[in-house]
Structures are given as structure tokens and as C-alpha cells.
Amino acid sequence: MADAQTQTPPAPDTAPGTARAFRAAVEARDADAMIALLADDVVFRSPVAHSPYPGKAITASILTEVIDVFADFRYVTEIGGADASDHALVFEARVGDKQLTGCDFLHLDSDGLIDDFMVMVRPLSAAKALADEMAARYDRIVARASRS
């Protein structure tokens, strides 16, 4: 029998459209599908940066990089009703040799697109590893965003 802690539960059939589509895109490592669900005025709130990142271009660039930083990524819990504008997707992943637990907090606008995207991760040692990896890619993130 497989260890229950290492199995990823399937996306529920009753999950809301955008949250479910976002989860599926992330699990497929499909950056284009993730980006298609972002509102033009989305604000990304990083777990490792004080100031938020406003706009689709920078958020898309961050997401494109972070899917390469996270290894063994899997969602483990979804929170949010079908009619809710707020959703939480709890995940587990690894950055280098650091295991982490995190949560994507998504707010949907009136068109059903993600207009506020906040990520939190723990423990601190994993957050630091994530910060180091993303800092090493910062110039590439900014350059990609400026071309969009």
C-alpha cells in the first residue's frame, strides 16, 4: 500500500472553474495555461519579498520561473466553494534539499480571473532557500516581464 502522505489527491470534480483550472495547469507545469487565468491587473504577493508585484507580465514571469524552482510539487488541499471569489490551494514541494508546505491564496475578479495571488510558505529554512533561488533568477524574471 502506498504511503498516504506521498499521494496527491485528485482535483475534486466540484472544484470551482478557475481554481481547478489553475491547479491543473500548475500540476501539468503549463505556464501558458496558468498565465491565461491571470487578470491584466493581477497583484502577486511573494512569500519572500516585502513589496507586491503588480501586473500580469511580472506575475507570469515569476510563475514561469518558480515552476522550475519547485521540485516534487503537489497540491494536497483545496479550500473554496463554487461561488466563492477566494480560494486556497495548499501544496508541498522541495527547493533543493528543503521540504516546504505552502499555500496559494487566489482571489477572482468579476470575470473569474485571478486578480490577487498571495503565496505563503513554511518553514523559514525552506522560505530562505526559495528566496535564494528566486533572487538568482531575478534579472531573468524582470527581463522576461519587460518583453511582455
Image (spheres, helix red, strand yellow):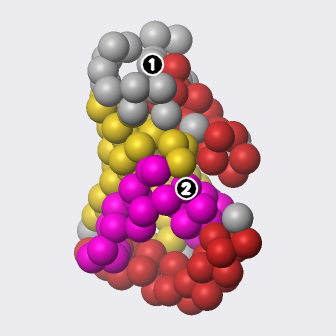
Q: Residue at x 45, y 75 (%)?
A: 130
Labelled disc at residue 55: none
Q: Secondary structure at mark 2?
A: helix
Element type where label 1 sits in the image: loop
Residue position marked by numbered label 1 in the rendering: 16
Residue 144 is at least partly visible in this image: yes
Question: Where is residue 70 shown, x and y percent of the image?
Answer: 56, 63
- Residue 19, percent across and down? 47, 30
Tell me the quarter of the image containing the N terminus. top right
Residue 98: say if magenta.
no
Q: Is residue 8 above or below residue 125?
A: above
The disc labelled 1 sits on which kind of residue? Pro
Q: Nearer the viewer, residue 16 or 102?
A: 16
Is residue 53 found inside the magenta-colored segment of the image?
Answer: yes
In 3D space, how far apart are the residues under numbered discs 2 and 1 (Cα atoms)? 22 Å
How packed mark 2 is, by other alpha carbons closer than 10 Å (few <14, some 14-19, many 20 or more), is many
Tell me the kind of residue under disc 2: Lys
Going by the image, does 142 lie left or right of 116? right
Quadrant showing the C terminus: bottom right
- The region drawn magenta spans 41-69
On screen, residue 4 versus residue 26, left or right, reads left
Which residue bears the numbered disc 2? Answer: 56
Tell whether 74 sits left or right of 29.
left
Work out whether mark 2 precedes mark 1 in sequence or the reverse, and give the earlier one: 1
- Residue at 60%, 62% in the rendered image: 57
Which residue corresponds to the image point at 61% horizontal and 87% vertical from the top-left? Answer: 139
Find out whether the residues at labels 2 and 1 contact each other: C-beta distance under 8 Å: no
Q: Which quadrant of the figure has residue 33?
A: top right
Q: Residue furthest top?
A: 14
Number of marks in the rendered image? 2
Taking depth in this image into account, of 9 and 104 the one nearest to the observer is 104
Give coordinates of residue 107: x percent, y percent: 34, 38
